[in-house]
Each structure stands twice: as structure tokens, then as C-alpha cells.
Amino acid sequence: MISVNEYFDATVKSLGYTSAKGKSSIGVMEEGTYEFGTSAHETMNVIEGELIALFPNETAWKSYKAGTSFEVATNTSFKVKSVGQTSYLCQYK
């Protein structure tokens, strides 16, 4: 089954699904800064655009452009800045 998700006044939208590899969501973010919490380990793959991320216990933002990815631990929160519209694939473990 596919679930539809909207966050931050519909500036972030995603479709959640389960495949043979596990749970994932694919979505698009409008330009802006967002903070997300995790309930599972996440691998965020940037498909198009750019995300600039700030991870727990870090002070420097890191840039991730199309074709790159980053990982976020379970039960943490992280911030991202979307540079223009950015699409992503998030895989949960």
C-alpha cells in the first residue's frame, strides 16, 4: 500500500511504500529549512537538487547534491536546507 504524506504546510510531500528491500519514501521538498526526527535508521538519497544537512552533535552544515546520500541514526533529529526544489529517496532500516 502507498501512503501519502505532507509536512510543513505541504512544502514537503512524499509517497511511502514497502518493497523487497524494505520501507522507503520518495518525495520533493520546496526550498526552505526543515527539521526531521527519525524512528528508524535512514539513508537519504538526493535524486535531484541539493540538500544541505546539519546532523546531531555537529556544527558544520554539509552539502549533498544529486547522486549523493547521507545516513541518519535511529531516534535522532537532523536539519536540512533544500536549495530550490529537491527530490529524494529515503530508505529505512
Image (cartoon, rainbow, N blue to C red):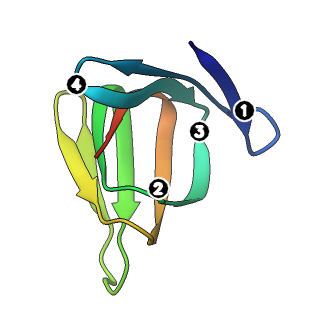
Q: State the image coordinates of residue 50 (x, y, percent, origin top left).
A: 35, 38
Numbered tag placed on residue 31 in the rendering: 3
Disc 4 marks which amino acid?
Answer: Lys
Residue to which mark 1 is pinned: 6
- Say which residue appears at 24% left-offset and 28% top-offset: 66
Q: Nearer the viewer, residue 3 or 64?
A: 3
Tell me the CA gap for discs 2 and 3. Answer: 10 Å
Q: Which residue is mark 4?
A: 21
Q: Do residues under tags 2 and 3 come within 8 Å of each other at their CB atoms?
A: no
Real-space Cα separation, disc 1 to disc 2, in angstroms: 16 Å
Rendering coords of residue 81 (x, y %):
49, 52
How many marks overall?
4
Under circle 4, the secondary element is: loop
Residue 38 appears at what percent x and percent y?
Answer: 47, 60
Residue that numbered label 2 is attached to: 80
In the image, 46: left or right of 85?
left
Query: Given this view, does label 1 or label 2 mark the residue nearer the observer?
Result: 1
Q: Say whether marks 3 and 4 touch (CB < 8 Å).
A: no
In terms of sequence position, does the residue under pointer 2 or pointer 3 come before the other? 3
Occupied quadrant, residue 18: top left
Mark 2 or mark 4, which has the lower sequence index?
4
Mark 1 → mark 4, Cα distance in angstroms: 24 Å
Name the secondary structure under disc 3.
loop
Mark found first going from the N terminus, 1 or 4:
1
